[in-house]
């Protein structure tokens, strides 16, 4: 573990479960840069996708919806190259819908508005909006026809590992982020997962369009990941913060359906020595590392968190109480179950603790 400046310690006392801010969709903007101003909308004097989105869906935006939170995050991932060199474009990933939007031309505001209206607005409004006029409700609802205005939009098949490295906002993330990025890029190939670093190639309009993104013509057995630094996602004191998005069609190392397919898993307090175990447990086998788990999300904005004994008793009053204790911590860590509201998804058999990755701590 690297030394941190005085006054910038990592908080190892507060439980991590539930510290992820809920969101319906996270927009990962591909800037190709490893760091940004403290407020990302100030990048390039405000001429950037994050600023455009804030104007549309921010607190004062005309599509603002307090019941449908959209997180906008910059990343170091490169944008796809436009077929026309004179047109500057920006790319974006959307999670947990697992979509990639390769071209958002900077010469027009229309493409960003099409992104909002075609992909980011809710398909169904919260009941709190029932009192709004029909015109207002219609304006806040997604319109599929706008998706057709964004050429090359595709499903995401790659695993994405996104690490907060926003040094312009907090030095802890600025120190730990690049170290974790380097460790993931080193360890993923050793575990049979290729690391893609080049911009995603998009066929021209005159050629056959690929069905989903990934490496250039990968074999069906190839696992590919993209590793990038991202801007502030909350919880500097829990650095290193890491979000792992597992694609919908993912399978485990033994070929079984991946328990976390279509999900985003948030970890906090990750150190370089945890990376190998995280790859093995979460990415390859679909197990959660309880001690680092901040929360998770699935398509539709379903929020994932660990259940407390009280909630488990309400959901399953006759369910047997687990007898195993996780690292002798608080009793709510006895079982690994995801709760989405009052709907509990039982994955007791898919769990991991830091004892499972202890063998990889020596390098700290």
Image (cartoon, rainbow, N blue to C red):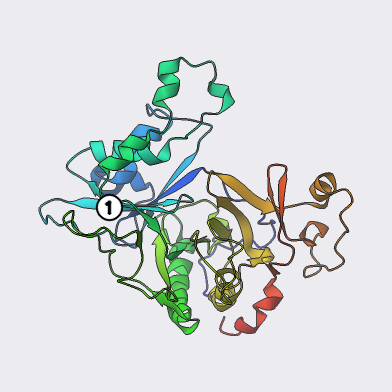
Left or right: 243 as drawn, with respect to 60: right
Name the foreground residue: 36 vs 26.
26
The x, y position of residue 77, in whole percent, is 34, 62
Which residue is situated farthest in the front direction here?
Answer: 208
Residue 211 versus residue 299 in the image, above or below: below
Q: Residue at coordinates 88% horizontally, 58% vertically from top-left?
A: 320
Mark 1 lies on a secondary structure that is loop
Left or right: 200 as drawn, with respect to 326: left
Q: Residue at coordinates 33% horizontally, 70% vertically from top-left?
A: 215
Left or right: 147 as drawn, with respect to 126: left
Name the foreground residue: 178 vs 288.
288
Residue 214 versus residue 209 in the image, above or below: below
The x, y position of residue 147, in whole percent, is 32, 41
The x, y position of residue 171, in whole percent, is 45, 61
Crowdedness of circle 1 by 10 Å Cα count: few (<14), some, many (20+)?
many
Residue 332 versus residue 278 in the image, above or below: above
Name the foreground residue: 357 vs 165.
357
Q: Is residue 207 among the parts visible in the rendering?
A: yes
Which residue is situated farthest in the left direction here?
Answer: 86
The x, y position of residue 124, in whole percent, is 51, 31
Which quadrant: the N terminus? bottom right
Q: Which residue is mark 1?
A: 152
Q: Residue at coordinates 56% horizontally, 58% vertically from top-left?
A: 266
Which quadrant: the C terminus? bottom right
Left or right: 331 as drawn, with respect to 338: right
């Amino acid at each position: 573990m690297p030394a941190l400046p005085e006054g910038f310690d990592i908080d190892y006392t507060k439980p991590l479960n539930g510290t992820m801010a809920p969101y319906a969709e996270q927009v990962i903007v591909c800037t190709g840069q490893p760091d940004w101003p403290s407020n990302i909308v100030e990048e390039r004097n405000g001429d950037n996708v994050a600023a455009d989105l804030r104007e549309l869906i921010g607190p004062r935006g005309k599509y603002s919806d307090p019941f449908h939170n959209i997180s906008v995050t910059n990343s170091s991932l490169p944008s796809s190259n436009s077929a026309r060199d004179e047109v500057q474009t920006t790319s974006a990933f959307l999670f947990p819908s697992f979509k990639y939007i390769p071209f958002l031309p900077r010469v027009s505001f229309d493409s960003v508005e099409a992104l909002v209206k075609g992909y980011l607005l809710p398909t169904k409004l919260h009941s709190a909006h029932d009192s709004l006029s029909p015109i207002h409700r219609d304006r806040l609802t997604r319109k599929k026809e706008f998706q057709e205005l964004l050429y090359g939009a595709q499903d995401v098949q790659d695993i994405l590992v996104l690490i907060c490295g926003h040094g312009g906002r907090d030095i802890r993330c600025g120190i730990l982020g690049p170290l974790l990025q380097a460790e993931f890029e080193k360890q993923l190939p050793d575990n049979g997962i290729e690391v893609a670093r080049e911009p995603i190639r998009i066929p021209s309009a005159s050629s056959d369009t690929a069905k989903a993104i990934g490496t250039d013509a990968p074999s069906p057995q190839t696992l590919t990941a993209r590793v990038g630094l991202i801007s502030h996602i909350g919880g500097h004191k829990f650095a290193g913060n890491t979000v792992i998005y597992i694609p919908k069609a993912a399978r485990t190392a033994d070929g079984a359906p991946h328990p976390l397919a279509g999900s985003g898993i948030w970890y906090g307090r990750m150190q370089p020595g945890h990376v190998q175990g995280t790859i093995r447990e979460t990415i390859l086998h679909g197990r959660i590392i309880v001690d680092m788990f901040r929360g998770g999300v699935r398509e539709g904005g379903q929020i994932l968190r660990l259940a407390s004994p009280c909630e488990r008793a309400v959901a399953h009053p006759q369910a047997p109480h687990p007898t195993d204790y996780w690292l002798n911590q608080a009793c709510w860590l006895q079982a690994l179950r995801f709760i989405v509201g009052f709907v509990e998804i039982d994955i007791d058999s898919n769990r991991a603790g830091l004892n499972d990755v202890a063998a990889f701590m020596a390098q700290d």
